[in-house]
Image (cartoon, rainbow, N blue to C red):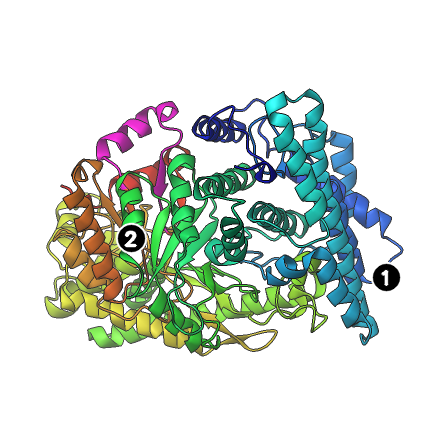
Amino acid sequence: MQAEQGYSRTIPWTERVATLRLRCLERKDPAADGRNLLQNRPDYVAVCDAQALADSVCVQSWQRRAGLRTRARLLALPFAVDELELLAGRPDFADMAVSTDQLEAARKVLANRKTPGGQTGHCALHLEPLFSGGIKGVHRRIENRLQNATDEEADTLRAYLDALDGLSIMIRHAGATASKALVHAADWRRAELAIMKTSCDWISLNPPRSFREAIQLLWLVNLAVEYGDNAGLICPGRLDRTLRPFYDADIAAGRLNRPDALMLIESLYLLINHFVADGLAVAVMVGGTDENGADTTHELSFLCLEALRRTRLVYPTVGVCWHPQTPPALTKLATELIASGLATPAFFNDPVIRRGLECYGIPQAESGHYINSTCVEITPIGRSNVWVASPYFSLCQLLLDEIAEQAEAQQPVSDFQTFMQHYFSRLASQISQAVLEQQTLRAERHEYGRKPLQSVFTRDCISRASDIDAGGALTNWVECSFVGLANLVDSLAVIRAEIFQKGSYSFTTLKDLLDRDFTDHEDIRQRFLNEHPKYGNAIPAVDDLVATTAQVLQQACARHRLPPDRSPFIPGTFCWIMHERLGSQCGATPDGRRRGMPFADGGGPAQGRDQSGPTRSILSTTSWDHHHLIGGLAYNMKFSSSLFTSQAAIDSLHDLILTYLSRGGFETQINVVSRERLEDAEKHPERHRDLVVRIGGYTDYFTRLSPEMRREIINRTDHAR
């Protein structure tokens, strides 16, 4: 890399990235003996917040106080840099322990301020004005809006300015950390540190002049919003769009080459892994289409995928936004990475998602500019106050409740369709109750919330002079998720056959069997499990139940609207880790699932039940319409690593993925790992601490999962067997 890009080749980058990768794993190790870089963060933040609130006690406007709190947080954010990093801005709380007295005093102050609930973050920001005009340009825009503001609007805009000032100072602090490291740095390292300092000083006010400065600014702004506003999981978003002008200009001028750009993207990925706690999700997307429907694939699309190869950590996931004109080279690269054992690439269906977004009111010109805002839920970029996964519904618990009611009824329903109507009525009632709860949370957020820095980078919070928590964003949906869809329809198929067609059981006898978790009746459980048709095998009698259920979910959600602007309540079927958590709280179900066992992990079949091969599993999963499920649908596949020893096998996997997408599948993600390695990791976690697997829409380290979740992964159908 040329001098202005700031990379010394004294130590080869392959060695540096390998070392940085291991350091990340070590610094986040729960057994790091007081050196875990995140463990002091909550207490440190509490003390900072309490001090900021105490300092602003004479300020009447809560909006202004929120801006001052964000500023104080950012000014106190501790940074570190070691001798191998290329980008500044790695937070490190290892030395930020607070005393018991400090923490107790802080909690007393904070107890006087209500903290509202509800979802936060889970978005990608509107960064174009920042990249074109810099912080001083954004500052100027806010000052201009102040000229014709009401008193309340002025409080909001001044809070924005306070938060923006905090961001600018925080960026300079990140650069100063690099400057301090110069004192003891080796000669080969000094130029790198000097460029970090110079870059941060410049972008603390001005627009980036290079690819390096653009990626540095993107990281620091996302970090500042997440940390300063407590807005969880701000995503890098469409790096191949945001960074494209800087990449193209630097390449054309000879200031940058492809390998050096890759190093900077890898450096960004390493910083994300250092800051974001494990068990969550951070998303990058590549490819897709523009406002005219034209393909947007760029060389950066490939680099964003390629950066996963050497980092091989849990963050970020990189979603390929497929459409029929996507260059095969892009989908083949993602497939090759998956076949090599990387779980972090995924595939999203651009036409399906665009259709869904337009259905919910996103203009056609903007419907291609979206992000999976953590797992697989979709939010529009730069305009989102969307609350995701709010809440999760346990479809099977509602089924058990309906079975219990029918068992107690003097005249239980006499036909399957009536039973379905009763169940769906119960589900609709649960949805209505959940919407009321979300409305309450929205009202609390409006009164007690405020995220001034996130508002600055969310349309149209500046022009409206309204905070994101007060209705300033253009898009304010709430997305919910229905967990256990496959278990529900498999159970309904058993109920239809055993109660209504054969008459083998009444609701009373079925309830008794389930209440006792099939105790002394393993033969019946096996019959329910293996002798009835199951979703995932292209059997219309079951697949039609999924289509019916999905339609009912969409219609039931569509009846509701939420503040601040009568936003829709949008369904999804992804589950994060909730298929394990809700499953642990649910009794045995008629599909043969035992009490406490995990539910199915998304929109696909339940674990081990797609016994007719991956093609039939795909046919089932794409036999119904996905486009309304903007709340997210994950379809997991699992293959043994022993299968992909030839290019022909990798090509077959690629064809399978394209079959799923061309048939209208929303999203798919794939684990390629042997059962033997998973079982060895279960027994010897210390040997496999970096084994990353796909769960229910996100990735995680296998050895850090609960024992139940590990078993759930192992028990998924292995299509190589």
Q: Of helix, strand and loop, which one carries label 1?
A: loop
Query: Which residue carries the number 2 mark?
Result: 329
> Which residue is rendered at x = 21% and y = 73% of the image?
416
Q: Of helix, strand and loop, which one carries label 2?
A: helix
Query: Which residue carries the number 1 mark?
Result: 60
Range of residues picked out in magenta: 672-696
Give the amino acid at mark 1. Gln
Q: Quadrant of residue 541?
A: bottom left
Give the amino acid at mark 2. Ala
Check disc 2: other Cα within 10 Å, few if <14, some if 14-19, many if 20+.
Answer: few
Q: Residue furthest right?
A: 58
| Residue 593 x, y percent position in the rendering | 25, 50
User: Which of the numbered marks, if any, corresponds to residue 536?
Assistant: none
Left of 59 or right of it: where is 245? Answer: left
| Viewer-side residue, 437 vs 55 | 55
Left of 273 or right of it: where is 110? Answer: right
Quadrant housing the C terminus:
top left
